[in-house]
Amino acid sequence: MLYQIYETQRSLMEPFSDFAKVTAKLFANPLTPLGQTPLSQRIAAAYDLIHRLGKDYEKPEFDIREIDIGDAHVAIHERVEIDKPFCELRRFKRYADDPATLQQLKQQPVVLIVAPLSGHYATLLRDTVRTMLKDHKVYITDWKNARLVPLSEGEFHLDDYVNYVQEFIRYLQQQYGNCHVMSVCQPTVPVLAAVSLMASRGETTPLSMTMMGGPIDARKSPTAVNNLAVQRSFDWFENNVIYRVPSSFPGAGRRVYPGFLQHAGFIAMNPDRHATSHYDYFSDLIKGDNESAEAHRKFYDEYNAVLDMDADYYLETINTVFQEFKLVHGTWEVRNEQGAKELVRPQDIRNTGLLTVEGELDDISGSGQTRAAHELCTGIEAPEQRHYEVKGAGHYGIFSGRRWREMVYPVVRDFIAEHQKAPPAAPKRAATRKVAA
């Protein structure tokens, strides 16, 4: 019922939001009579803020069209390599005209970035992807909004997440010989499970795993996120935060944890900070500081765009990761694609380097939660394990922004390079004017 009420409210707000947008433009235009009053700038700013508070935020684009590598200009083509019911494996293919640059691109490591499925879209890692593209062939898991997935596609479980990751790793290994895996926040747990299961079966595992700000052991330095999961029972979550998708969406009838509830939780963690940010935006509009105002828009266009998660996946994650701690207790069994259960044994991983990254001020995944992966992966030799704590960084700072680009990325890049093996010789192709890597 709550989902229907929310959608009704959003539909009723939409025309007012559109009206506010038009009114803001009228008062901001100095060529119109309304835009020539002494208070026009303030009125325009107020209506603009009303529009942004009431508008519906859709999934953003990655919008990575080009990057500079050294002195070369490299074009980026985004395409879907594998399309699964609940996820797309998305590739950012690089094109260059310069033969030397092309040769450099072809020799670079392949990295699978596993994006979080925890409320926001994978585009939250836009800065991560853009930076990684300078030295790597990049693929990312682009998770779908569950309310857009028809019921005919079946349910989505935490086990399915693990199986998806394994399928994507095998695909890249088939294409390139092997790959590296990088997980940010929530996926550190299913990624470690995926690689562990591959190792237990004797499959080839990725050359390296980079795990950033994730709840490997949520018992360590518990945050508000951890405390909520511990203080409430599994039944409470199922009875209070799970709703069915309304009939107006393709996934009508699907049980989901709605994105708007997750967004409300994000805001509730730091309400003062968000209120101050919106007031600063209002002030920037009045002052005519378009650069700061645009930075605010870009951030909240991303932050306010949320997706629904399938109920089974969400509830199983709460139970497995935050309530029973099955990974660290060695009791987690994952049902494979054939329907058989397999025990997750991180100690079976041997030929994969492990890098963990934590932010000193992370208020989502507390200190030590990610580092705990080293305690589980006892089969990896000590020289192949490394931990890096980012001083002064919060949760988002370890994968986005200046600290990510200047402090974290060099560590990640060098660790991947150390574990990269010479790729197999690629078949020769006829020369073309523009070639991809």
Image (tube, rainbow, N blue to C red):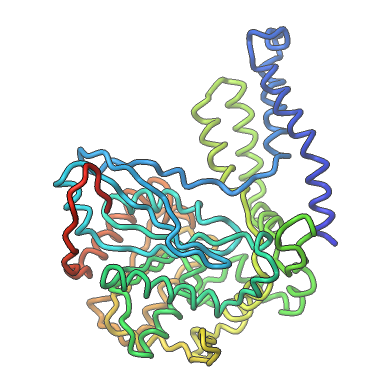
Q: Residue furthest left?
A: 100
Quarter holding residue 284: top right
Quarter holding residue 426: bottom left
Left or right of 349? Residue 25 is: right
Quarter that holds the N terminus: bottom right
Left or right of 424? Residue 265 is: right
Where residue 166 sits: x, y (%)? 43, 76
Tell me what residue is drawn at x 79 percent, y 59 percent. Answer: 246
Where residue 433 sits: x, y (%)? 22, 42
Q: On screen, 393 above or below 50?
A: below
- Along the line of sight, the residue nearer the viewer: 254 or 16: 254
Q: On screen, 270 above or below 47?
A: below
- Along the line of sight, the residue nearer the viewer: 396 or 96: 96
Tell me what residue is drawn at x 51 percent, y 72 percent. Answer: 215
Left or right of 287? Residue 17 is: right
Left or right of 63? Residue 288 is: right
Where residue 315 sits: x, y (%)? 66, 75
Q: Residue furthest front?
A: 430
